[in-house]
Every structure is written in structure tokens, then in C-alpha cells.
Image (cartoon, helix red, strand yellow):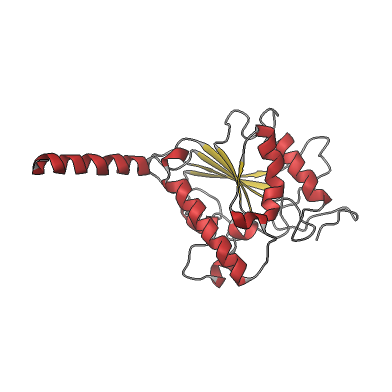
Amino acid sequence: MRPLLRTLACLTLFTTLGTALAEAAPRRIVIVRHGEKHTALTLCSLGKERAQALAAQYLSPTSPMSLIRNDPPAAILAMTLHTVETARPIARAWDMKLIAPPIGYIPIRNNRYFNAKLNVVNRDVARDLLENPRWHGKTVVMVWEHFHIASAALEAEFAGEQVTLRQLLHLGQVKGVKGGVPTTWPDSNYNFFWILTYDRPGDTVPSRFEVVRQYFAEPYANLPSNDWGAPEPRPANSGCS
């Protein structure tokens, strides 16, 4: 190949790759925490009911309450055992395969060694969402572990690393959010969605950040919906830890 032709071919390749990367971010990312837990192995009765409620209402393919009824997800992602258990009814409702890493089927351990492994998962997922053209213009649902959504404590423990979605998806740079995107997702809250919208091509910072609180209709209207950071009111027999 002549030098000029070779140069033009390389420029075309880099332009194509650059365009692909510029258009890689999803249009929407819907983030929700897993349901209330009983042990490291399973959700409690409240958490199991919340998982069913999410599939039947807010993340349903048919419910008028659904956040994604007219916007079918390209993928439903989970990362830990509790998130897998929460996401399964949602995936079944959409007749989709749930995507989770191998560590997502191991009981979670709240120690540095296990969190370091989850940090790697978080980085890999975030990088793929922002750089893989397969997600461009699509919606992705993430059923996630709250420490790895936003946690000032986890970020401090792994100072110098990118470990939370708040860091990895550049949520601290979103403009127009009153008070800014929270630095920590409270332990007591299972009843919120964070919705990220990307409507500027090539931008890896969301153009919009929205918080949606869960208020379920019957037959799930009994599920708690406490204020952000407030204690969760639970029935005495819920079995939740």
C-alpha cells in the first residue's frame, strides 16, 4: 500500500473507532438497590416482596407505573447474590437473561478482600457501559449493591482508586443537581432509583440525574418507603437483618 493510502486508511480506522467510542454511552441507566436482606445468602420476606413488586410495577414490561415499559432494557445487570435474587423476577418478566459475574453467586462478605473483588467488577462494568458501542442509545437496568453505588466510606478505604458508580460514572460532575449527587447511599434505604440520562453524543457525564422514590400500588402498597437517610419501618415478622 502506498504511504498516502496507508495514512488515509489509518485515519479512517481511528475516525471510526473514535466515533464508536463517542457514541458508546447508553441513553439511560436505571440503578436500583437490591431488596432487604435476611442473611448473606438470601433476602428477607420484605426483600423478596420488593423484588416481586419491582418486576410487577416499576420495572415491568406492561404496568402503567413502569419506568421502562416503553423503553425496553438492552440488559439487566446484577453484581452480588442479593442483587441477583432481586433481579431475577425482573429478568423473568422481560423474558431476558440476567447478566451477573461469577462473584455474584457467592455470599457477600463485608471485608476488604471481597470488596476489592467487587471494585474490579464495578470498574469493568462501568468501563463497558461508557465505551462499548453496543449500549449506545439504549437503556440498561442495574440492580446493585449500595456500597458500590455510592459510599464515602468505601471510597476512603480505597483512596486513590475508582470504586463506586458515583466515581466511575462521573456523577459528581452532573450539573443542576441541588446539593449534588449524594456521596453515600444510606444503609436504611431500599426504596429509591437513580436514573442517569445521556443525551449529548460523546459525553461520559450524564446530562441528567433523577431520583425516583418507590411508592408501590396494591398488592404491594405495604412496602416501606422511608425518607432518604431515615430508618426503614419494618413489620416485626419481616426477618430482615
| Residue at 10%, 41% in the rendered image | 4
Q: Name the one closer to the observer, 148 or 3.
A: 3
Does any portion of residue 169 appear in the rendered image?
A: no
Q: Quadrant of the C terminus?
A: bottom right
Query: Along the horizontal axis of the image, is 107 left or right of 17?
Result: right
Identify the residue at the far front of this view: 1
16 lies left or right of 155: left
130 over 219 or under it: above or below: below
- Image-based side of 138 in relation to 234, left or right: left
Residue 163 is situated, as x and y percent measured from the top left of the image, at 52, 62
Q: Nearer the viewer, residue 211 or 18?
A: 18
Residue at x 67% of width, y 59% of height: 106
The answer to whether residue 124 is above or below residue 99 is below
Tell me the residue at 45%/39% (across/down).
Answer: 134
Quadrant of the drawing holding the N terminus: top left
Q: Position of residue 86 (x, y in %)?
A: 71, 47
* Residue 12 to residue 82: above or below: above
| 196 shown above or below 79 | above
- Whole-percent x, y for residue 21 in the image: 36, 44
Most extreme residue toward the right is: 237
Residue 66 image point, x, y percent: 67, 33
Q: Is residue 213 visible?
A: yes
The total number of labels drawn is 0
